[in-house]
Amino acid sequence: MFWIVDNGASHNGARSFERMRSAWPTAVLVHLPVHASWLNEVEIYYSILQRKAIAGGDFKDLDELAARILAFQDRYNGTAEPFDWKYTRHDLNDYLRRLAKYEQTLAA
């Protein structure tokens, strides 16, 4: 099993690998690249939630904030559609090959 995480402080560094291995020996911890939170669908949702429902809000208490978040969740779930990734690992490998070739020409 692969456990994919961002580079947050709570699960970053060598200790995070050790903690994962000791708790779940068959799990492999995989970190997303730094500054690649857009690859994490949860991060995308939180970004949308922040911009559309929370930013600029003046909430009198946590109950009002919770109500706003739950209302947004209901609306979002009613219109959300699965994301269809078009960029394949082959596309990435092709890009990395072109990048390496370009870097070689710069070094020469």
Image (spheres, rainbow, N blue to C red):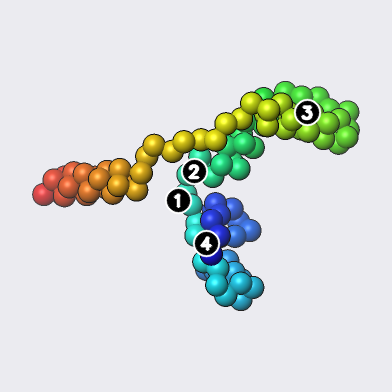
Q: Amino acid at mark 4?
A: Phe
Could one spot residue 6 in this view of the protein? Answer: yes
Distance, label 1 to label 4, CA atoms, is 15 Å
Residue farthest toward the left in the current orientation of the protein: 108
Mark 1 in CB contact with mark 2 (< 8 angstroms): yes
Residue 65 visible, this orientation: no
Residue 107 in the image: state x and y as whole percent. Answer: 16, 49
- Location of mark 2 (residue): 39
Mark 3 vs 4, N-terminal side: 4
Q: Decide: few, some or many residues near mark 4? Use Cα within 10 Å; few <14, some 14-19, many ≥20.
A: few
Q: Is residue 24 above or below residue 47?
A: below
Q: Secondary structure at mark 4?
A: strand
The span from disc 3 to disc 2 (Cα, nearest Å) is: 25 Å
Marks 1/3: CA distance? 32 Å
- Type of amino acid at the residue the image marks with label 3: Ala
| Mark closest to the chain's N terminus, 3 or 2 | 2
Residue drawn at point x = 76 percent, y = 24 percent: 57
Instruction: Please report the residue visible at 51 percent of the width from the left and 35 percent of the height from the top.
Output: 83
Say above or below: 102 vs 20. Answer: above
Q: Secondary structure at mark 2?
A: helix
Cα–Cα gap, marks 2 and 4: 15 Å
The disc, 1 or 2, on the residue closer to the chain's N-terminal end is 1
The residue singled out by tag 1 in the image is: 33
Name above or below for residue 68 compared with residue 87.
above
- Residue at which label 4 appears: 2
Q: Amino acid at mark 2?
A: Leu
